[in-house]
Image: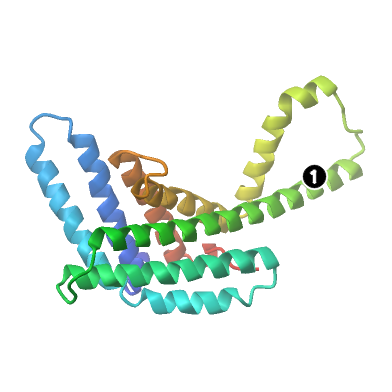
């Protein structure tokens, strides 16, 4: 109950709840569309999805200010690569929220003469840039973590009494397995990095589909959005699991 209250008291938390509901409806609609006798339920799910999507736009109205603040904070990062990636990503997010606000104004009739499709594509493009740069930052952090884990492992092997075993055949056949194990250990030791990577990877499926770069069906987009929203909710409930800039 305390966790729910914490989420409900934050605009970001409420947006994540609405987003999870929206994509859950999308996923369920995809699963039920091909089943006979489910037409009425599918129609209700689509209506709920549209209503939730409209409600989310109200929560996002002030997000452009948060994105500007995040841009100012990212400039202060000490590491060059995260500073560059986060600054450019947040600038793209500012433009995305501006486009989103224009679309909201169009939907409620505050403006006229707005080409909805054109602004939707602009929003999708800058959302894609934001997520792509965020994933580049995640990849950089993963490589740093993998390097640290590899160095720690080398130290343990060096201090061990048992000499390391070398095998050319084993090295050639198991290098991929060793790499994946190193990746798994790195992410396991850094849950915030794991959550951020999963969230960004799932999210990028949406603009990839909208821009026609990589087409996905409604089920894939719905599942990706649901997983991303749940990962985002975890960081709202447990702020210590949010990835911090170096």
Quarter placement of the N terminus: bottom left
Q: Residue at x 9, y 38 (%)?
A: 39
Q: Is residue 108 left or right of residue 179?
A: left
Q: Residue at x 69, y 67 (%)?
A: 80
Q: How many marks?
A: 1
Residue 6 visible in the displayed image: no
Q: Which corner quadrant of the image does residue 16 belong to?
A: bottom left
- Reading the image, the residue beneath label 1 is 153
Q: Is residue 75 above or below residue 35?
A: below
Q: Is residue 123 left or right of residue 30?
A: right
The residue lying toward the viewer, choosing from 107 and 25, is 107
Q: Which corner quadrant of the image does residue 106 belong to?
A: bottom left
Task: State the image coordinates of residue 76 (x, y, percent, origin top left).
Answer: 63, 77
The residue lying toward the viewer, choosing from 230 and 98, is 98
Residue 243 visible in the displayed image: yes
Task: State the image coordinates of residue 132 (x, y, percent, origin top left).
Answer: 51, 55
Q: Residue at x 60, y 58 (%)?
A: 137
Q: Is residue 128 left or right of residue 192?
A: left
Q: Residue at x 23, y 48 (%)?
A: 25
Q: Is residue 94 above or below residue 221?
A: below
Task: State the image coordinates of residue 155 (x, y, percent, origin top left).
Answer: 86, 47
């Amino acid at each position: 109950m305390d966790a729910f209250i914490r989420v409900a008291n934050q605009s970001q938390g409420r947006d994540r709840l609405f987003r999870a509901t929206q994509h859950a409806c999308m996923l369920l609609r995809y699963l039920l569309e091909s089943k006979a006798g489910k037409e009425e339920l599918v129609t209700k799910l689509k209506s709920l999805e549209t209503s939730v999507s409209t409600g989310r736009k109200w929560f996002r109205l002030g997000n452009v200010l948060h994105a500007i603040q995040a841009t100012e904070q990212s400039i202060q990062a000490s590491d060059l690569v995260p500073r560059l990636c986060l600054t450019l990503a947040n600038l793209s997010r500012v433009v995305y929220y501006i486009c989103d606000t224009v679309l909201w104004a169009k939907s409620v009739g505050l403006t006229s003469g707005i080409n909805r499709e054109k602004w939707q594509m602009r929003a999708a493009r800058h959302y894609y840039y934001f997520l792509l740069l965020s994933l580049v930052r995640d990849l950089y952090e993963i490589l740093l973590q993998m390097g640290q884990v590899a160095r720690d492992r080398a130290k343990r092997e060096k201090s061990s009494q048992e000499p390391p075993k070398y095998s050319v055949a084993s090295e050639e056949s198991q290098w991929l397995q060793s790499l994946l194990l190193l990746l798994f250990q790195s992410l396991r030791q850094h849950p915030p990095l794991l959550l951020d990577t999963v969230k960004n990877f799932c999210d990028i499926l949406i603009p990839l589909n909208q821009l026609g770069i990589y087409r996905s069906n409604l089920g894939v987009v719905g599942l990706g959005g649901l997983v991303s929203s749940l990962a985002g909710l975890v960081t709202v409930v447990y702020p210590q699991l949010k990835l911090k800039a170096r």
